[in-house]
Image (cartoon, rainbow, N blue to C red):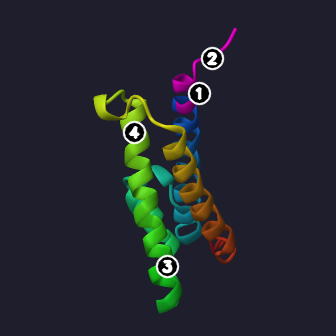
Amino acid sequence: MTIPQLTVRRVQAMELRIRIERVAIDAWRRVCPAADPSESGQIAARLTFLLVGLDEVRFSVVYRAIRFGRHVYGRTSDVLHGRVNMVNVSRVEIDEWREAVERLEEIAKSLPARKTPD
């Protein structure tokens, strides 16, 4: 049985969305290790924790990556919720989104180790 390419791309969009959520939750836990991640609010707010402790130059680079990550998160929501203009997401868009997610993952890996509760 062959899976239609549009279905494959929707599954890929879901995978990217989950990866963004993992980055956001990990960043949040790095700053607030003792708290429950469900208390932190939206994914956009969680991604902001990637900025904690950065110098001015790195801050602006990471901030741009976060903004695009927020955009990707929103677009993947459109795909997964079947919003008309994003049901037929292209391979090119998926590839671009994947690059953005990989960038966020690289940023998260480059941050200092998690704080441990006292």
Is residue 2 a member of the stretch shown in magenta? yes
Give the residue number, with chain letter if any, for mark 4.
Answer: 77
Circles 3 and 4, Cβ within 8 Å, touching? The answer is no
* Residue closest to the eye, 81 or 30: 81
The answer for how far apart the CA atoms under marks 4 and 2 are is 21 Å
Q: Which mark is residue 37?
A: none
Give the residue number, with chain letter if any, for mark 2.
Answer: 3
At label 4, which amino acid type do we have? Ser
The boundaries of the magenta stretch are 1-9
**Residue, x 49% and y 45% (percent of image)?**
93
Q: Residues within 10 Å of mark 1 (few under 14, many from 20)?
A: few
Circles 2 and 1, Cβ within 8 Å, touching? The answer is yes
Q: Residues within 10 Å of mark 3 (few under 14, many from 20)?
A: few
Give the residue number, with chain letter if any, for mark 3.
Answer: 61
Q: Residue furthest bottom?
A: 56
Give the residue number, with chain letter if any, for mark 1.
Answer: 8
At label 3, which amino acid type do we have? Val
Residue 28, x across and y down, in percent: 52, 63
